[in-house]
Image (tube, grey):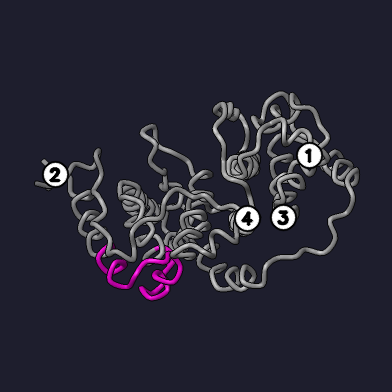
Amino acid sequence: MTSSPSSGPQDEPAPAADTPDAPLSLVPGAACRPARRGRRAEPMSEMIGPSHQAMLERLRRQISVCGATLDDVARRSGFSKTRISALLRGIEYYPSWEITYSVVHALGLPPWPLRRLWTSGAYEAAKSTAWITRSIQAVQPLGPEERPVEHRGFMEKMEQYYISYAQALLHIERPERIVDEAFDILWAGWDEAAAGPNLSRTAWRLLRSRVLLRVRRHPDGRPDLRPAAFMTVAQSRIDEPVARFVEISEVAAFFDAISHLPPDQFDVIVLRYLCAFPAHEVQEATGLSPAHVHTLDHHARGALELLRRPTARE
């Protein structure tokens, strides 16, 4: 029986080496005492931007892993428990770099990537460049970046894959900004990520999550990729208006069909046919095995045929 597009086709079971990673839990490898029981953390505001959210998730995760309490963080940072709580929830006001850095330092996190996340979050919160500059200058200089050598090498290896994927889905002038953000989040938890079973897979899932936060959505939550049809090279080379309209309509239907695919199939189709990477590079980018990439490609193309032929689903 053919599954309906509303439920969406499901990924085939992956080989053992390609078992999806657990939810991201990237934290530095600093020594932390075992987590202790305590009151559940208050939820973050739903009104904050994606960069602000990423920064707070990193701080909150580190507090949880280290088994710290708000009292601990307040004592180490020199700020009140009330102000620390507001910072960690993203409520009341956008925090200054001074209080944010005090928490970053107290938790032993690398300040450079988190300052960039803080800066992006400040712009999301409509803070002026002057305010951001004053806030940064109120804190002692961080000094030269001390990025792990292995992280730098990983960036150089993956950067073009990540930029191409982000550009294919977002069509923005500087997709590098989203990719750099993903690399900064990865850096903040580099030790654990690098020690895991599949660094490429962990990093890819992180990159995908940062990109999909920015895509337009259908009412049912699927990514709305139809605007990408107006950005293809093929349609830009068609001078006749009617022919261009037909091309855009057909490509838009194809892009809409892609959005029905489950995540792994979606990624393979985007990388193989929108970004034009060969299969071995798709494998390198995503951390999937060659056999799994082949299987995903095969099933995704089959699913797309069904999705583009309504009578086949009736």
What amino acid type should be assigned to the residue bearing mark 3?
Answer: Pro
Magenta span contains residue 19 = no
**Does label 2 or label 4 sit earlier along the sequence?**
4
Closer to the camera in the image, 238 or 72: 72
Quote the CA–CA distance across marks 3 and 4: 8 Å
Asked if the residues shown at circle 3 and circle 4 are in contact, with their CB atoms under 8 angstroms apart, the answer is yes
Magenta span contains residue 284 = yes
Quote the CA–CA distance across marks 1 and 3: 16 Å
The residue where tag 1 is placed is 76
Q: Secondary structure at mark 3?
A: loop
Look at discs 2 and 3 and give the one toward the viewer.
3
Q: Position of residue 279 (x, y in %)?
A: 36, 73
Work out whether residue 177 can be spotted.
no
Q: Secondary structure at mark 2?
A: helix
Closer to the camera in the image, 199 or 40: 40
**Does label 1 or label 3 sit earlier along the sequence?**
1
Q: Position of residue 115 (x, y in %)?
A: 75, 49
Look at discs 4 and 1 and give the one toward the viewer.
1
Instruction: Give the label on residue 313, or none.
Output: 2
Look at discs 1 and 3 and give the one toward the viewer.
1
The residue where tag 3 is placed is 110
Residue 212 vs 190, above or below: the answer is above
Q: Secondary structure at mark 4?
A: loop
Quote the CA–CA distance across marks 2 and 1: 61 Å
Local packing at callout 4 (Cα closer than 10 Å; few below 14, some 14-19, many 20+) is many
Asked if the residues shown at circle 2 and circle 3 are in contact, with their CB atoms under 8 angstroms apart, the answer is no
What amino acid type should be assigned to the residue bearing mark 1?
Answer: Arg
Work out whether residue 144 can be spotted.
yes
Residue 142 vs 147, above or below: the answer is above
Instruction: Give the label on residue 28, or none.
Output: 4
The quarter of the displayed image where residue 52 is located: top right
